């Protein structure tokens, strides 16, 4: 069985414990590879190597770093199909989604930041000719980059690429639930000629090696994407060490449909926002608010559209909904659906595990589920479920829906569907979320500030915001 090894000091290494964790294929429920179960010793080796590499890498020219990142992007594209297959096998997502979204975005992340660093500039502040301040932007040091399982290579490279472009070295820890494409990326980096120690990737349990990495005294900066509880923990353990911290956390995003919206488009977008990647995208619109004047008509159209979704093998191009990521996660989602029923919710469709035939019978498939009749402030409408589960809620007025949309502890994203442009602007201004879409969902420009308000995170990623995070400003004042 293939062993997923660590990438430390420019080479693939077995974990020092020589212990491995089973890696499951969610589409069949079977173990298909083994993951390095790393320990503090491996983290220490990776940090030491990154520290050694920092001097040369941080003083290398921007053009040199650009060229290295571009050659990683080239190699990702050369290995495109292998990465698509690996991402789908490891995560349960459909190959078509990995081909359309995950893998193209991984190479794009490297190209985007390879180029961005060539255009990155800093400020000067002139004191009426008496003195001149200029700000240098220096790489920070060894960065910890920690990413989740839902968009494995996409989110890992979204951190690694700007960190490296800015001149830092990196120790990355992908989720142990989906390590395969990070492992393939390690091999790609060796082929692409990434200098040793510049990027290190260590696999293992977040609860065990996560703290070793985030609290390591030689790691001054942590970029984390994952759940709010893990984010809280990282904030707590790193605060006394005054580390630079970026947290991209959970969401419970509202999708708001006004009665003047383009009906067909808003139904299609509600389905896409609810069920893409089996509802396992932090930006999914899991709370669907529909104005009461069109509620019944919308509900019928929504359920009809959902009935057309095919749950099936991730390899099949006709499949819309693949497997959720793990048995544990599937059980959690099913228990949330039970909780919704106990709270008086009515399951309008789905609600159950789907057992497929043949060698897929042990796979973690769930029917797309819609629940109605729950109050906006109950646990199901307040806590993230992160699965193919939509809660449908009617609303009367703009004021009421804004109040309900803003009622959770999260503030990651929101979508508004309306043909009244003034209403679009007005509601967008009042929604507490880092990203608001009007008449669309998940339309991403990599230059925008991306991140969450409230308990959805701290800081913003994207474009120059990422490069600002991964650099330390130093002001120099010259008396003239
Ligand atoms: P987790 O918080 O469980 O894990 C995220 C990463 O943190 C994993 O690599 C995990 O490792 C690691 N980790 C776990 N414990 C620690 C620790 N004590 N110290 C350091 N690292 C640790 O999140 P999930 O992987 O379950 O991802 C789903 C969550 O991510 C959802 O809440 C989702 O909303 C959020 N998310 C947010 C995004 C955003 O941009 N705001 C984007 C995508 C997802 P391991 O898996 O090995 O335990």
Image: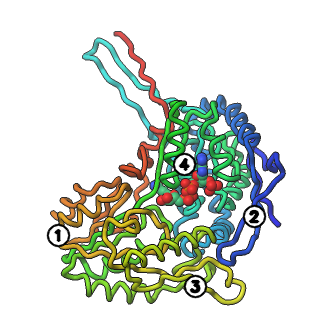
Question: Marks 2 and 4: which is nearer the front?
Answer: 2
Q: Earlier in the sequence, mark 2 or mark 4?
A: 2
Query: Dot 4: within a 10 Å radius of its alpha carbon, few (fewer than 14), some, or many (20 or more) residues?
Result: many
Image quadrant containing the N terminus: bottom right
Q: Earlier in the sequence, mark 1 or mark 3?
A: 3
Query: Dot 2: within a 10 Å radius of its alpha carbon, few (fewer than 14), some, or many (20 or more) residues?
Result: some
Asked if disc 2 is less than 8 Å from ligand 1, the answer is no
* x then y, percent, for residue 162: 53, 44
Q: Is residue 339 left or right of residue 33?
A: left
Residue at mark 2 to residue at mark 4: CA–CA distance: 26 Å
> Is there CB contact under 8 Å for labels 1 and 3?
no
Q: Nearer the viewer, residue 364 or 308?
A: 364
Query: Dot 3: within a 10 Å radius of its alpha carbon, few (fewer than 14), some, or many (20 or more) residues?
Result: some
Q: Quadrant of residue 107?
A: bottom right
As drawn, 236 above or below 336: above
Residue under label 2:
22
Residue at mark 3 to residue at mark 2: CA–CA distance: 24 Å
Image quadrant containing the C terminus: top left
> Is there CB contact under 8 Å for labels 2 and 4?
no
* x then y, percent, for residue 18: 84, 51
Residue drawn at x 42%, y 78% is: 341
Q: Is residue 451 visible?
A: no
Which quadrant contains ligand 1? Answer: bottom right
Residue under label 3:
354
Q: Is residue 149 left or right of residue 21?
A: left
Query: Dot 1: within a 10 Å radius of its alpha carbon, few (fewer than 14), some, or many (20 or more) residues?
Result: few
> Is there CB contact under 8 Å for labels 2 and 1?
no
Residue under label 1:
397
Under circle 3, the secondary element is: strand
Kindly identify which numbered label has been placed on residue 159: 4
């Amino acid at each position: 069985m293939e062993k997923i090894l660590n990438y430390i000091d420019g080479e693939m290494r077995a974990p020092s414990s020589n212990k491995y964790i089973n890696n499951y294929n969610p589409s069949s429920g079977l173990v298909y590879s083994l993951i390095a179960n790393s320990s503090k010793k491996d983290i220490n080796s990776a940090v030491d190597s990154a520290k050694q590499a920092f001097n040369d890498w941080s003083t290398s020219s921007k053009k040199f770093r650009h060229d290295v990142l571009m050659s990683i992007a080239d190699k990702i594209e050369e290995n495109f199909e292998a990465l698509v297959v690996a991402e789908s096998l490891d995560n349960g997502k459909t190959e078509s989604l990995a081909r359309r979204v995950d893998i193209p975005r991984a190479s794009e992340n490297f190209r985007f930041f390879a180029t961005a660093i060539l255009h990155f500039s800093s400020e000067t502040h002139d004191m009426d000719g008496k003195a001149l301040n200029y700000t240098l932007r220096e790489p920070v040091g060894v960065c910890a980059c920690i990413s989740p399982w839902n968009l494995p290579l996409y989110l890992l490279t979204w951190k690694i690429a700007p960190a490296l472009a800015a001149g830092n070295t990196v120790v990355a820890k992908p989720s142990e639930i989906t390590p395969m494409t990070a492992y393939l990326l390690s091999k790609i980096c060796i082929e692409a000629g990434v200098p040793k120690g510049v990027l290190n990737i260590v696999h293992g349990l977040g609860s065990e090696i996560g703290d070793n990495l985030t609290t390591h005294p030689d790691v001054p900066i942590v970029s984390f994407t994952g759940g709010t509880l893990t984010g809280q923990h990282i904030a707590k353990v790193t605060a006394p060490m005054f580390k630079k911290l970026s947290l991209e956390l959970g969401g419970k995003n509202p999708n708001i449909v006004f009665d003047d919206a383009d009906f067909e488009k808003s139904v299609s977008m509600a389905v896409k926002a609810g069920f893409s990647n089996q509802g396992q995208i932090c930006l999914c619109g899991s709370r669907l608010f529909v104005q009461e004047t069109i509620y019944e008509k919308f509900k019928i159209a929504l359920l009809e559209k959902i009935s057309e979704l095919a749950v099936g093998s991730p390899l099949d191009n006709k499949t819309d909904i693949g497997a959720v990521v793990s048995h544990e996660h599937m059980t959690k989602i099913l228990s949330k659906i039970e909780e919704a029923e106990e709270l008086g919710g009515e399951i309008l469709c789905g609600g159950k595990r789907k057992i497929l035939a043949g060698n897929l019978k042990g796979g973690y498939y769930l029917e797309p589920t819609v629940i109605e009749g729950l109050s906006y402030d109950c646990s199901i409408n307040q806590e993230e479920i992160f699965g193919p589960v939509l809660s449908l809620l009617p609303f009367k007025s703009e004021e009421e829906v804004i109040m309900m949309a803003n009622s959770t502890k999260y503030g990651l994203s929101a979508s508004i569907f309306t043909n009244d442009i003034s209403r679009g602007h007005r509601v967008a201004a009042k929604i507490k979320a880092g990203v608001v879409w009007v008449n669309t969902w998940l339309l991403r420009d990599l230059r925008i500030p991306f991140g969450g308000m409230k308990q959805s995170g701290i800081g913003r990623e994207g474009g120059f915001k990422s490069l600002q995070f991964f650099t330390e400003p130093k002001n120099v004042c010259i008396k003239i």
